[in-house]
């Protein structure tokens, strides 16, 4: 998929290109600021370039409204042993504040749904911060269900180093 036309006039979604690394980093920083997590951003252009365009560890789509980049989504495959097939995991989806409410986020999710189906994926998964009530309402209107029976765990930093020596 290179360009995905949407039902929203003047809004298109395209696959990110190598030249978009700075744009992607800026979207990440804006999202981190919105989520009150700016101090956690350590990614830089070199890291993103290596991860996205050399190692191909994730993919990005860019939403453009009237030819202005206004949002992005970063996603990658994970795998369900129960389904026996890959899924898409959405790490981040962000639309600039002044463009929210136009249906652009829903169109971005529609694009991800299309990618999911084209690739034969079983589902689309993502996390949402508990305090982000507006996003939760948005997701529920799309038919998403909170997976309340699951707790997210993480090992990083020194704990990851310690774990690797087991």
Image (cartoon, rainbow, N blue to C red):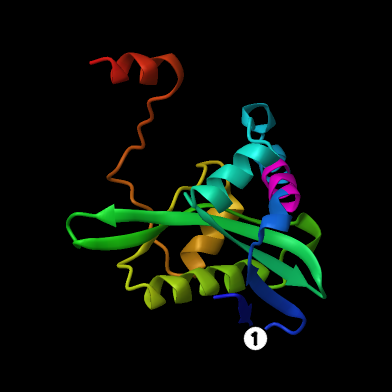
Q: Is residue 158 above or below residue 22?
A: above
Q: Quadrant of residue 12?
A: bottom right
Q: Dot 1: what SS? A: loop
Q: Is residue 27 left or right of residue 49?
A: right
Q: Is residue 28 above or below residue 85?
A: above
Q: Position of residue 144 (x, y in %)?
A: 42, 63
Q: What residue appears at the point 46 percent right and 72 percent down from the top-left corner? A: 115
Find the magenta span and give its range.
22-29
Q: What residue appears at the point 35 percent right and 32 percent down from the top-left corner? A: 153
Residue 157 at least partly seen: yes
Q: Quadrant of residue 30?
A: top right
Q: Does 26 appear in magenta? A: yes
Which residue, given by chain and number where applicable, does mark 1 sit on? 7
Of residues 141 and 52, the one nearer the viewer is 52
Q: What residue appears at the point 75 percent right and 62 percent down from the top-left corner? A: 70
In the picture, the quarter occupied by the C terminus is top left
């Amino acid at each position: 998929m290179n360009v995905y036309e949407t039902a929203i006039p003047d809004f298109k979604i395209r696959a990110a290109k190598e030249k978009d690394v700075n744009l992607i980093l800026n979207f990440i920083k804006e999202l981190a600021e919105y989520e009150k997590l700016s101090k956690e951003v350590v990614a830089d252009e070199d890291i993103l370039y290596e991860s996205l365009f050399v190692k191909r560890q994730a993919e990005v789509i860019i939403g453009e409204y009237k030819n202005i980049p206004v949002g992005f989504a970063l996603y990658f495959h994970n795998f369900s042993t129960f389904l026996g097939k890959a899924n898409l995991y959405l790490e981040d989806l962000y639309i600039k504040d002044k463009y929210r409410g136009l249906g652009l986020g829903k169109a971005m999710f529609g694009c991800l749904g299309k990618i999911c189906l084209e690739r034969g994926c079983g589902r689309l998964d993502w996390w949402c911060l508990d305090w982000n009530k507006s996003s939760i309402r948005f997701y529920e209107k799309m038919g998403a269900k909170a997976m309340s029976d699951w707790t997210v765990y993480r090992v990083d930093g020194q704990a990851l180093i310690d774990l690797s020596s087991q």
